[in-house]
Image (cartoon, helix red, strand yellow):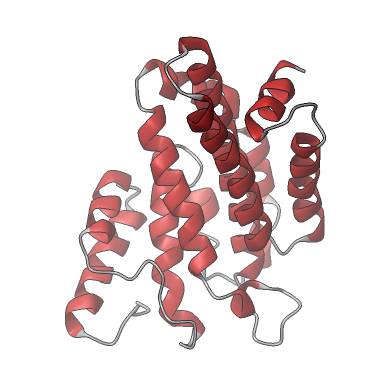
Amino acid sequence: MIVACSTEETESAEGDCYASVLEEAWDDAITCFENGGFEESPAQDKPAEDYEYLLQWAGSYGGKYGLAGSGLLSTLGSDDDSNEGSESEEESSFDFSAQVRSLTESGQLTLAITQLTRAVALLNAFPAKYRTESSAESVYYAKDISLIGAIFTAFLVEMQKQDFSNSLSDGTLTQEELVAKADAVLETLANGGDIVGDPSLKEAIDKQISELENQPGDSTAEKLEALINS
C-alpha cells in the first residue's frame, strides 16, 4: 500500500480508506478520506506516490455517482495495457442526462455538485509534472488521470447546467446569483482543461468553453441560458 504521508496514523487511515475503495463502498470511503486528516492541497514537491490518495479520494466521489468503479479505478497505478480503451467504453455507456435527472428527482443534485467539484479539485491537486504524459517526470497513470478528469468535468458541467436551469425556472435567485452559477460552469471547464493532458480530450473541453462564450448575452448567465435553450 502506497502511503500518502509519513506518519503511522495517516498510513493506517489510508489503508482503511483504500479497503473501502476496493470494496466499492463509496460512502464509507468518502467518510474515511474526509475525516482522515488528508491534505486537499498538498505541497507540490513530494514523490509521485505520495499523491495517490488524491486519486482514490476523488475516485470515491465519482464512484458514488456511477462514474468510477472497477472499470476506472482498477487502472490507477496499473501499467497493464490490456485495459486500454475500457474506460472509454464505460464513459460512452454512461447516461449523464439520466443520472442528472435521477439526482434532481431525489433531491441529491446539490450534494452531487459539491462532491464532484471537490473531486475535480483533488485531481487538480495532483502535481501537473506527474500527470502530463509528455513530461520526463510523468507517472504511469497520467493517461488515466486525464481521462477521469474529462469524465468528471463533463458530468459536473451537466449537473451545473441543470442546477442553473432549475434556478431560472423557480425564479428564486437574483441576477448576481445566477451569474455566479454560470461562472461556476466556466470555472469547471477551465479546471478540467488543466487536468486533461490528452490533446483530443482537452480540445473537447476547449470547444465547450468556446460554445458558451460565443453565445449571445451580456453576462455568463445570459450566455448559459442561450446555450441551454439552443
Quadrant of residue 138 within the rendered picture? bottom right
Q: Which residue is the extreme one toward the left?
A: 9
Q: Position of residue 103 (x, y in %)?
A: 42, 24
**Is residue 29 rendered to the left or right of residue 104?**
left
Viewer-closest of 119 and 110 = 110
Circle count: 0
Q: Position of residue 132 (x, y in %)?
A: 68, 73
Q: Residue at x 56, y 19 (%)?
A: 165
Q: Residue at x 44, y 72 (%)?
A: 52
Residue 69 visible: no
Quadrant of residue 208 within the rendered picture? top right
Viewer-closest of 69 and 167 = 167
Quadrant of residue 16 within the rendered picture? bottom left
Q: Residue at x 61, y 61 (%)?
A: 144
Q: Residue at x 49, y 47 (%)?
A: 68
Viewer-closest of 186 and 21 = 186
Q: Is 152 placed above or below 15 here?
A: above
Q: Position of residue 195 (x, y in %)?
A: 63, 61
Q: Is 199 placed above or below 62 here?
A: below
**Is residue 132 rendered to the left or right of residue 33?**
right
The quadrant of the picture occupied by the C terminus is top right
Q: Position of residue 158 (x, y in %)?
A: 59, 31
**Is residue 159 rendered to the left or right of residue 88?**
left
Residue 125 visible: yes
The quadrant of the picture occupied by the N terminus is bottom left
